[in-house]
């Protein structure tokens, strides 16, 4: 908004302009490509020749007559590091990306049940995944931002208290806890869903009481992933919790998950 105001002062006339940062369905990467800000890497993210792939794209739509910038030449050459490091093989030589396999999609955008084949591969990622960016050679060009608004300390911090997530009892508590954070996009049910997978993947038996609590959550989505999580421990304690819950569970999808977990534990 400040930039729009400054542009109007600079050109000396009014014009139509709207800031659309994360608020409109705009193909930002391809607009940035046409604007000469970089090239599209094999991991499908924009790579800026000076700053690498760790950049935040923002845009203004306007009817102001501006001269177009020249596209930037560049490519990944023979590098395929991102293809090999992707936990779910969402990237391949043949196709740019299968977004349905991407952990960023599964943990953030996907609203339903995460398929069993991906649950282990999510590892400790509760919100998104940067594996393909972290290994990108161009990431070495990254510099620390001077904008404090982007610092972890301005949001939830560098790490989440995953156990504290299960202490949240309502959407209002969730909204208060994550106000101003991108995590607020998830909603409480999906955050707990993701947390169940992360706890299970930790292999720490101290996670069992939290998964047991999640197995009684009002949301079937949470209970499904809690049931899977308990089944991963393959202990007498977790098995007993699942058996006891099966006798009380009414939702057929949750019952199915519990039954599978019991048979595999």
Image (cartoon, rainbow, N blue to C red):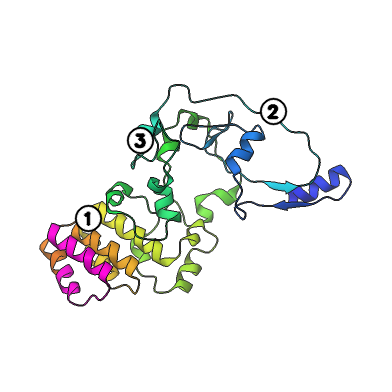
The numbered disc on residue 85 is: 3
In magenta stretch: residue 68: no
Residue 101 in view: yes
Tell me the CA gap for discs 3 and 1: 25 Å
The numbered disc on residue 204 is: 1
The numbered disc on residue 28 is: none
Dominant SS of magenta comes to helix
Question: In which quarter of the view is residue 72 placed?
Answer: top right
In magenta, the rendered stretch is: 241-265
The residue at the far right in this view is 12
Residue 265 in view: no
Q: Earlier in the sequence, mark 3 or mark 1?
A: 3
Q: Is residue 44 above or below residue 21?
A: above
Total numbered labels: 3
Residue that label 2 marks: 70
Q: Residue at x 30, y 60 (%)?
A: 196
Query: Taking 38 as reference, is 114 left or right?
Result: left
Q: Residue at x 21, y 61 (%)?
A: 230
Secondary element type, mark 2: loop
Q: Residue 28: x percent and y percent?
A: 60, 43
For the residues bearing labels 3 and 1, Cβ distance under 8 angstroms: no
In magenta stretch: residue 246: yes
Q: Is residue 64 above or below residue 71?
A: below
Question: Circle 2: is it few (<14), some (14-19), or many (20+) Cα within 10 Å?
Answer: few
Q: Earlier in the sequence, mark 3 or mark 2?
A: 2
Tell me the CA gap for discs 2 and 1: 53 Å
Q: Quadrant of the C terminus?
A: bottom left
């Amino acid at each position: 908004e400040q930039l729009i105001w400054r542009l109007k002062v600079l050109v000396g006339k009014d014009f139509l302009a709207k800031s659309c940062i994360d608020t409109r369905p705009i193909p930002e990467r391809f607009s940035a490509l046409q604007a000469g800000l970089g090239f599209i890497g094999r991991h499908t993210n924009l790579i800026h020749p000076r700053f690498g792939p760790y950049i935040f794209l923002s845009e203004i739509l306007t009817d102001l007559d501006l001269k177009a910038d020249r596209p930037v030449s560049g490519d990944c050459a023979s590098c395929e590091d991102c293809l090999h490091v992707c936990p779910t093989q969402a990237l391949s030589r043949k196709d740019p990306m299968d977004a349905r396999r991407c952990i960023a999609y599964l943990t953030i955008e996907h609203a339903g049940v995460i398929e069993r084949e991906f649950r282990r591969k999510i590892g400790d990622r509760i919100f998104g995944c940067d594996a393909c960016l972290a290994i990108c050679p161009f990431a070495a060009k990254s510099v620390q931002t001077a904008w404090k608004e982007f610092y972890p300390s301005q949001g939830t911090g560098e790490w989440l208290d995953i156990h504290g997530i299960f202490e949240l009892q309502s959407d209002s508590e969730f909204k208060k806890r994550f106000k101003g954070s991108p995590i607020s996009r998830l909603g409480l049910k999906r955050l707990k869903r993701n947390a169940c997978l992360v706890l299970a993947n930790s292999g720490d038996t101290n996670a069992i009481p939290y998964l047991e609590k999640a197995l009684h959550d009002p949301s079937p989505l949470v209970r499904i992933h809690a049931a899977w999580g308990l089944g991963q421990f393959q202990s007498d304690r977790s098995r007993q919790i699942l058996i006891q819950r099966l006798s009380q569970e009414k939702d057929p999808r949750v019952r199915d998950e519990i039954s599978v977990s019991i048979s595999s534990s």
